[in-house]
Every structure is written in structure tokens, then in C-alpha cells.
Image (tube, rainbow, N blue to C red):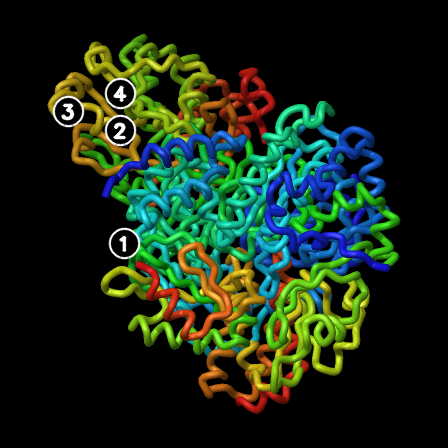
Amino acid sequence: MSLEFSEKAKKKIEEIVARYPQKEAAILPVLHITQQEFGFISAVQEKMVARILGIKPIRVRELVTFYTMLSRESLGKYHIQVCSNLSCSLLGANNFVDYLVEKLGIEPGETTPDKKFTLSTVECLGACERAPCMMINFNYYGDMDPKKVDEILDGLK
Amino acid sequence: MIKIFIDEKPVDVEEGTTVLKAAERAGIHIPHLCYHPAFPPEGSCRMCLVEIEGFPKLELACSTVVKEEMKISTKSERVVEARKAVLEFLLAEHPLDCPICDKAGDCKLQDYYDEYGLFESQFKEAKEKREKKLKIGKSLILDQERCILCTRCVRFLKEVTKTQDLGVFHRGVNSSVNIYDGATVENNYTGNLAEICPVGAITDEDFRFKTRSWFLKEGESICPLCSRGCNILIEYHPGFSRFELPKRVYRIKARENPEVNGFWICDRGRYGYSYLDEGRADKIIMNKIEGENVLTWENISEYLGEKIKSLFSAKKTSAIALILHTWLSNEELFLLHKIFKDDLKVEKIFFADLPEGEADGFLLTSEPSPNRRGAQEVGFDLKTLDLDALAGGTDFLLAFDPFLSGLFSTKDLEAALNKIKRKVLFSSYSHELNSLFDIVIPVALIAEKEGSLTNVEGIVQGFQPALEPPGDSLPEWKVLADLGRDLGIDTKFFEKFPSPETILSEMGKKIPFFKQKND
Amino acid sequence: MKEKVLTEHFGLESLYKIEVYQKQGGYRAAEKALKKMKPEEILEEVKKANLRGRGGAGFPAGVKWSFVPDTDKPKYLCVNADEGEPGTFKDRYIMSHNPHMLLEGIIITAFCVGISVAFIYIRGEYEAIALRLEQAISEAYEKGFLGKNILESGFDLDVFVHRGAGAYICGEETALLESLEGKRGNPRLKPPFPASVGLWQCPTVINNVETISNISHIILNGAEWFVKQGLPKDGGTRIFGVSGMVKNPGIYELPLGTSLKDIIFKHAGGMKEGKKLKAVIPGGMSAPILTADEINIKMDFDSLVEANSMLGSAAIIVIDDKTSILDVLKVVTKFYSHESCGQCSPCRIGNSWINKIVIRIAEGKGKKEDIDSILRLASNIEGNTLCPLGDAAAMPILSITKKFRKELESHV
């Protein structure tokens, strides 16, 4: 695994940093790119980002641990994030989670041994009219039931 | 100036003052944890909530600026309830470590609970578990469970040292103060972190488990370890009647002075207090006096006076030499100058100070002694001690100097001193090299006497004794005042038994620099 | 007859493409504003329209803009697209169906206040929407509606999309600013207010997506027309988001003042088969809950305040009689405990404490005193926190526990 940003990412980062009157403001967009490139943001990535933005690595970690979407550890290829908030709970999110736990053989917070799936419960995704819903990486899936879940997961390579 | 009312008491304050500061000036203490006068208000502890007429919610005293006719209540029922609520929340997730926590007796959480709480705990859940012994600095330990997230430490390292070594990781109740992967705080101001922590989250290993804060007494003094003259508090144990303690001083704390050191002191000054207790001389030692009476404080100046008078009448004052240092107070240096330079016209006056170090860009100066400026302003040209120049033709040496043993080798010192007939040493320390002198007279340290010092910027600061000098030690100014009287110099001045206060006043009359410095 | 203001063309395919948008009359309002109106006139119009904030707080937009001082400092506009209030999904619809309507509103707002840089702070999870917005922004630049000297008016404006990363608190305006500046989303003390001290200490206007999306309509059709679509004191429509146990969950744009009962039973199709109504949360999770007998109420800002609740984000969550209120409370306390930024003690510790009690009750280890404890602790959070999240947590916890006390007591 490369320990440098790809050329494409470097260019995007440069463009983003130029948008803000202060470099630091670019940190969230840069962290998104970092997580996209490497799959996670560990100490190595923290130092890279810190160097680019001229800040101390500790500041990067403050953010990575604050924001739910940023991960310090590597995640499975597909991160299944099931909404556990109110509307989804009303429409059976708990059963939905139980179904996934059984199907994948892991608990929320864990990753399958083949590193294909990570399962998490998250707060409101903003798709309550399609409860119960989940987000896999950044794709939204609503109106879930066991059949649909099977279809979707089995279709993921 | 505007008029406001705090608890129905009219108070006049300057525009722009916060409610907290206004109350302080009116003698009303509003409890607060995250607020520290060195930083802009943070507003996160919620302890300083007060009721202000016309405001629907309770407002923060630390950040609300007063307006004309504002009516503030710091004791209303709503305020009392809010304080209890905040305390209850803080204590809910706070470990009951008081029996083993160094901060006990000095802890804001304890104090406020005592004054505003006194409720029984209703928390029946499991408390959050965090790291309890995280080493975050050369002598600092962080207990994340005790931490109330006031972030004073984080802000100190951001605003004052600008090193940003601490940060807050995670969110909500999982929040914790942390360092970055073992990167401990490494600068000359780490000790301030333990001091500003309102609870026992950051503790100092230098103080850890050594004593209890309620055994300690406090004395105000000035740090002599460089020429900044930071104002300090010396915390010492007065001792028990039945047994002796190994030391008196347990801790140095910063004392606020906006002109000199602000709110802080450096680690050198904070941790370097062993000079106060270790290796102290406390008895007059006579090594080679034949056929003389035993020397005591009462007859020392007489004895010295005699020796000097005999040299004076034999027109041999050129045979007198002095070694001085700049830990001496303004008053002592003035007396020395008056007696030996002005009156006796002694030429061989040398200074043996500690070698220069490096300034740290903030408080610590490169000069490691507190009163070089004072010596200059009194009129001395600070000739560095040269042992040959000293010994040549010298019959009588008065050395006020505890540093000699560190500056010269035994061999060199011995060779030089052997050439001098009579040598008297005034020192606070027992050192084997003291045996090279005929008489060793123990003297008090700055922390143990009265006087004033002039710092690197020319600020004259008075000090009072914070500690008792050990054994027979007495301050140098006393010997010199007595000596001046015995020598019959300037009788108008010396007959009046001058004290540091009157000496400084005299200095103000004779030397323009010291004119307006009398405070 | 009251009209739809925002969602009129939502059914159109590719409305998000600028050519389609323009065909529906898009960007005519921007032309009118930049070419024919003075900033003061625009401000007056927006004030007269009684457009109140659609994010949750309901603060009048025109008044907020007027707080921006005259200054040489750069001014900024932040569009709050964080949409984190549970139950809310209306802004997602606006941005994915009609991003240009939002952009047009941004252009007019910026021109009115004298702003030349705008950021759309969009929640991190809405990645697809962020891409659509960036595409729309690109198109707008190409057609000269963004960039330098827009429509030859001498007015410059740059718009950037800035993605969040999963923190409800960043929907709070000052936390949004902190997050945008590259820091943890810790809310700031107010005063000073963002209108005077905002992004990088400069005056900043922060408005919700739906609020800004109304601007082009106000300019094109006039404030009077806008007020007629709603109520005299609350102009315009709201996009109500209905979810939970209804037959037809979704967005419903209706005039302010529409009855809640109608929204649930007429527009959203009523309860799902076999379910009876038990409770309704009328304005997003932070709005105090209403029981089944309290739904004869008009959905506007003042009516809900009178009923001790709030219109908030107009997100209506419908709860049925088979759902345990304890489960509802559990979800609520878990949410606020998880989303607390951690700065101030009442919210940080209080929410976690209440959550721990509720979990314990759900595990069957609750005691009678626990119900009183929950009420006491929530009251202690309310009014004592640094930012509104404390109140946003306390209000639902208090209302649920008070109104359904009997049911909760059956668990201890």
C-alpha cells in the first residue's frame, strides 16, 4: 500500500486548499479524500495531512476521533451502516440489524474475517420516509426487508 | 465607570468588565472552573451561571459584560439550584479518589461541593473508565477519570507556549484530554499545567504522595534562579514537634504579577527549590582562629570592624578584597558599596556569579542570578573574579559567595586563599571548601529575609521573609548595618539602626534609579 | 388558492439540470434582483415576506440579514445543509431534485448582504447530493450565474460545497462555523452572534437550505404573494416530512397553519394497517412530543409554541400504539448522548447519565425513583448548557417522560 497520495488526490487537495482563506479549513475535505485513498486514517495518514496543512498531527486526531464518519481503523470493503434512530426503529430497525448479524456472523462494530463487510449502527441518515434504511459506503438503501437485503448484499462483489 | 448591582449591593466598575471580575472587585466570589484570567472565557463548565434581571435564562458571569444598571444575583434560588446541578453532573462521573488524590485540600471541586453542594450522590450507574496514570510531561501525570474537561491545560499549551501538545479526543462523555502517541509535553513551563488544573487530573510527580496540602503553609517570595524575578509562593511544611522532616519546602507555585511574570513561572524556578533546604550552613564556624573569643552574631561585626579599622589606620585598605555575588539584595549591595567602595575606597571588589545560561524566549533569562541589574544600578562595575588579581597583596578577604566551589577547582582556590592572611566567608551552604576559610558565617537566603531585588527589566521588587532562616543564619544586611556603625561611617545614617525599608528609602534619595521604586 | 412554492416542479425529470431549470423560469429571479433591484429593496422584501428560518429555530431571515454590520471585512454565507435532526429529510429532496433553486436563492441572498463567498455545509452522508450540487454549481459558473461580474451587475460570487463528517452538533450554527474552520464542532458562546463575528471572525449569515430556497420565489412573486401562501405572521409554505407508522411517508409541501391531523390522516394516508395513533413528534426529535389527543393543532410556529412544543424542522414522526414508549425514550437518549460534543458538563454528563438509567430500566433493573431522576436530570440540563443541544435533548426527554409516565412506570 502506497504511503503517498495519488497524483489525482494531490491535485484535488491542492484545488480544495485554495478555496479557503485559511488552509486549516480544508481539513475535513482532505480527510474525506484521505479516507477514500487509504480506507482509514491512521497515525501515518494523520502526519501526512498535518504536513500538507501546516498543523500538528494531534489536531488531525482530534478531528478523526470527533467525527463519526472518519475511521482510524481499516473497514471492510463495504461498510454497512444501519440507521438506528426513531423512524427506522419504529419500522423495525432492530430486527433488521438482527438479520444482518445472523447473515454476516458479526456484531455491530465488527468486520467479517474476509474483510468484505463491516457492520455499524448509525444515527439518523435523513431518509426516514424510506425506513428502515441503511447506507453502504455512500449508497442509500431504503424500505429494507430480508429479501431486499439478500439481493443487495449478494450482489456486492 | 458604570453602576451595577450585585446581590443588591451597588458597585462601580469600568465599562467592559465582566460580571465575574466585577463581583470579584466587590468581594463576591462567583465559583468557576474553566475560566482562567489568562485566557478568553471558555464558558464550558457552567459553574459561574448567575441570574441577571431582564434575561430569561441564567447567564455566564465569566463572559457577560456589565451594562449600566444591571442587576445581578449570585445567590438566588435559581442560581443555587443551577450550581448544585452542575456540581452533581461533574461529580457523577468523577472518581471518588480524594483519599489518594494529591489535590485534596486544594481542589476546586471539593471546595465548591463544600460550599454549594452538600447533596447525596444519586448516581447509581457505572462510571466511565479512562486512563488514570498517563505520563504527559517530564513530571506530569494525567488521570483522565478525574478530568472535568475544563480544557485549561489544552488552552495553556495553545495560547501561552503555542506548542499544542494536548488535545481533546472523542466526543460527548467519551471525550478525554490526551497527548499524541507518547509525545509528552516538553517545554520549560510544564509545571504550570498541574497548577492550573482545578482538580487532581494533572498531578506533579514532584509532589505526588509526599504530603497533604493542609499541612503546608504558604509564604510569598521572589524566585532567585534567574533575573526575571518571578513572584512565587513557597509552600512549606512547618514540621511536627516530635520529629523532624527531611525538608521544609514541598512546592513552589506561581504568584500573579502582570508586570513581571504574568500568571506563570518556569520549570527551572518551580522545581529547582532544593537550594532552599539542601546542604544549609546553620552555625558560625571558626576554623583557624587562635586566641580569640568565640564568635557569635553579636560580636561578628565588632570583630570584622576591628580588623578593618586596623588595616585602615595602617593605611592598608588596599589589602582588603571583596568577593560578591548578585543574589545579594539591593539594600545589601548598597551598604557594601557605601562602606567598602565609597568610604574605604577598596578597589579589589569582584563578582563571582553562576555562568550565563540560555534564555528561553519567555520568562527565563540568560542571567542565572536575580540582582545583576541591582548591582549595576547601585554603582558596581561587575568585575569577574580573577583569583590572581584577588590574592595579590590581599590581607583581608570578605567573601559573600556560595558559588565559589562550583566556579573554581579546589586546587586553584586553595592556592589563592593560602596567600591571603585573613578570610571570612558568608555563605548559606556547608561545603568542604568552606574549610579553606578562617570563619564561615551562615546567612539567610532571599526566601528568608527582607529586602528588594531589581529584575532584568529594571523593576524593583520588595520581598518579605517566607521562611525562617535555619539555625544561626541571619541576613547579610544586618551584619553590614552593624559593621557600618562599628566603623563609624556616616553616623547620621548608621546610628539609626537602618532596616531594609529605610535603606531603600535612603537609596531613593541618593540614586535617581531607585527614586520612585519605594513601594 | 394557496400554491406550492418549492416543490412545484419536483416531478420533472432532470430538473437538476440548468437547462431544464431555466425552462421553468429558473434564474429569472436572480436576474431581476441583480439587474433591477437594490440590496436594500431585496432586504425589505424578504422582511415583509415574514420568512422564518426553516432549520429549526425559526428566526426571521430578513432580520438576521439586517444584523450584518457595514464593514470592510469579507462577509460569508453558510447554507446549513447538515440536516441532522432525526425525522428530517426535506433538504435532501430540495438539493437532489432542484439544486439550482437553492443556488439561485444563494445568489440573491449574497447580493443583498454583500457576500462574495458562500459555503454549502452539507452532511457527510449526503455524498451523492454533494456531487449533484457541485455539478449544478459547475453549470451555474458556465452560464455566468456564478463567478465574476454576474449578469454584468459587477457582483462576484463563489460557491463551494463543504462536506461534514457525521456530527449532528454541526447543524448548530456556531458549531458549523467551527467545523468549517477545520476544528472540532464545538459550539461557540453567543454573543457575539455570527452576523457580526462568524467565519474567521468575519460577519456571516447562516441559513437553512429550505429558507434560502424560498428567496427566488419571494423576489419573483413578491412578499405579499408569499405571505398569502402561509399566515400573516409566517409567510410561505413548509415542506413537512412525515415518517413513522403512516401509509405514505414522504414530503408534503403545505401552507403554514395546516392542521397536523390533516397532514397525518389526509395527506400521508393515515395510520398503517392495523395501527392506532399513540403519539406524534411534530418538529423533529427535539420537539416535545404530542399525545394522540393533542394533534388538533395548526402547524405554524406560534401555535406549536402555545402547545408547549415547536415547529422545528417540520419533521413529523408518527408513533403507533404497539410501540413501547420506553423504546422511544431509549432511542432518544442514545441519540443525544452520542451526539453531545462534550464541551459542557450538563449535556456531556447529563445525557449519558439519563441514557444509562434508561438502558438499565430496559434491562429490567429499573426502580420507581429512576423516573423522577430522569425528570430531575433533564430539567437540570435544560437552560444550563452552552448551546441549544442541551435543550433539544431535555425537551423531548421531559415531554415523553411526563406524558407517558404511567407507561414508563410499568417497566420499573
Label 2 residue SS: loop
Residue at the spot 79% in from the left edge and 45% down from the top edge: C62
Location of mark 4 (residue): B397
Q: Which is more N-terminal, label 2 or label 1?
A: 1
Image quadrant holding the N terminus of chain C, namely bottom right
Location of mark 1 (residue): B246
> Amino acid type of disc 4?
Leu
Q: Which chain is home to disc 2? A: B
Residue at the spot 70% in from the left edge and 39% down from the top edge: C196
Disc 2 to disc 4, how far (Cα)?
A: 16 Å
Q: Which chain is home to disc 4? A: B
Q: Badge 4 local density, few (<14 within 10 Å), some, or many (20+)?
A: many
Disc 1 to disc 2, how far (Cα)?
A: 24 Å
> Amino acid type of disc 2?
Phe
Disc 3 to disc 4, how far (Cα)?
A: 19 Å
> Amino acid type of disc 1?
Pro
Compared across the picture, whether B5 is left or right of B62 comes to: right
Disc 1 to disc 4, how far (Cα)?
A: 35 Å
Q: Is residue C245 above or below residue A52?
A: below
Residue B476 quadrant: top left
Residue at the spot 42% in from the left edge and 23% down from the top edge: B333
Q: Which is more N-terminal, label 4 or label 3?
A: 4
> Amino acid type of disc 3?
Ser
Q: Closer to us: mark 1 or mark 4?
A: 1
Residue B87 quadrant: bottom right
Q: Which mark is residue B409?
A: 3
- State the residue in front, C332 or B381: C332
Location of mark 2 (residue): B403
